[in-house]
Amino acid sequence: MDSSRPDQSLDRARRPGRWLRHFGFWTLLVLVNSLKREGPVIRGTDISWIESFKIAVSVWYSWALLAPVILWVDRKLPLRKDALVQRFLAHVPLSFVFITAYTYLSHAISVLIETPEQAAWLAGPVLSNALRATTRSSNMIYWVIVAIGVSFEYQRFLRDQEVQQAETQRLMSEAQLKSLQAQLHPHFLFNTLNAISDYVETDAATARMMLEKLGDLLRSLTHTSADSEVALADELAFVETYLELQTLRFGDSLSVRVDVDPEVLNALVPPLILQPLVENAIKHGRLNSVGAAASIQISAWSEGDRLNLRVSDNGPGFAPDWTKEDARGIGLSNTRQRIHTLYGQGTATLVAANAPGGGAQLDLHLPLRKAIQLANA
């Protein structure tokens, strides 16, 4: 079995292309410089294009062979990629080594291909020749290679930093979302079991049917517990089962109307986002009054790139001095934190207000993002 990582395999696949581009770049420099040097007088002798080409080969292919080594050494320096000053200072002694290597490599190629000027001055001591080489144009070429290599490494470092920061932020957001969702599940379960307990002794048949509905809800929660978003159709199906359970509890005292634009059924929403709002409407609606009937409406529609979700009731509404800070219960505060964590502050909002015709109205405004297809299609 191949135990190499996918990024390593991808790097190996791209390697032939990189070497081909490397060879093509230096070959282009050879051709350009051979054309520039066609016809000049070198050491009092006119040279042909072939001779000029040989000189360019000895110069630029020497750097072509050394450039990968220079860049490899630069990557191996025990310095941070963003320590630019220290990196360039480290190349001061390295430049002496590589320019000396270039000097003798270029001379070896000149001898091998019999160029018209074979740098006879290389017969002197190594140290003397190296010092003389550092004052030639070779010095500038070395620093151009280093500057290009360091700049690419620095850009790669910045990209890696951005990716790492984004990944860290994503993991933190996911952890926070899972924490908020885990907080909501026991709250939902406790409230539902508390409602069922009222019927265990007085109406065992109703309690049994409510437990069956609760089992359906828990199975649904199990399937979506790892998802940060689900299709609105799935969320509505969950709420419908929850309302069936509540109808067993309240009977004709609870009526529900659902008005959802079919075009947004595949819009993505956080799981268990509507249930707390519906539960809040039931809890604070007219069911608080003896003999009163509660009417709840669930609406969903889109406006441009925004998905609107609304849960309204016919209860007494919010007090005139009510603010969102007064919503200290888990339902509304948890919902607000979840949408802010998932979509960002200001991108998604939860607005609580009194409806024009009376009662409370909770409006969720989320970015409109649609699934490719419905989960149950």
Image (tube, helix red, strand yellow):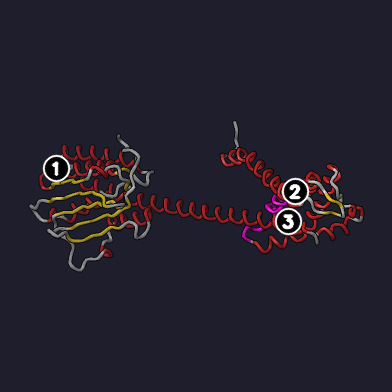
Residue reaching furthest right?
124
Q: Which residues are magenta?
A: 67-82
Q: Between marks 2 and 3, how big is the CA–CA gap? A: 17 Å
Where residue 338 sits: x, y (%)?
34, 54
Q: Between marks 3 and 1, how big is the CA–CA gap? A: 93 Å
In the rendered image, which quarter contains the N terminus?
top right
Q: Amino acid at mark 2?
A: Ser
Where residue 303 sits: x, y (%)?
26, 52
| First of labels 2, 3 by sequence position | 2
In screen coordinates, is 22 left or right of 361? right
Residue at which label 1 appears: 202
Q: Amino acid at mark 1?
A: Thr
Residue at which label 3 appears: 141
Residue toward you, 31 or 17: 31
Question: Residue shown at 77%/52% (left/top)?
Answer: 37
Where residue 274 sits: x, y (%)?
26, 49
In screen coordinates, is 371 left or right of 121? left
Residue toward you, 321 or 213: 321
Q: Secondary structure at mark 1?
A: loop
Where residue 172 sits: x, y (%)?
45, 54
Query: Foreground mark, 2 or 3?
Result: 2
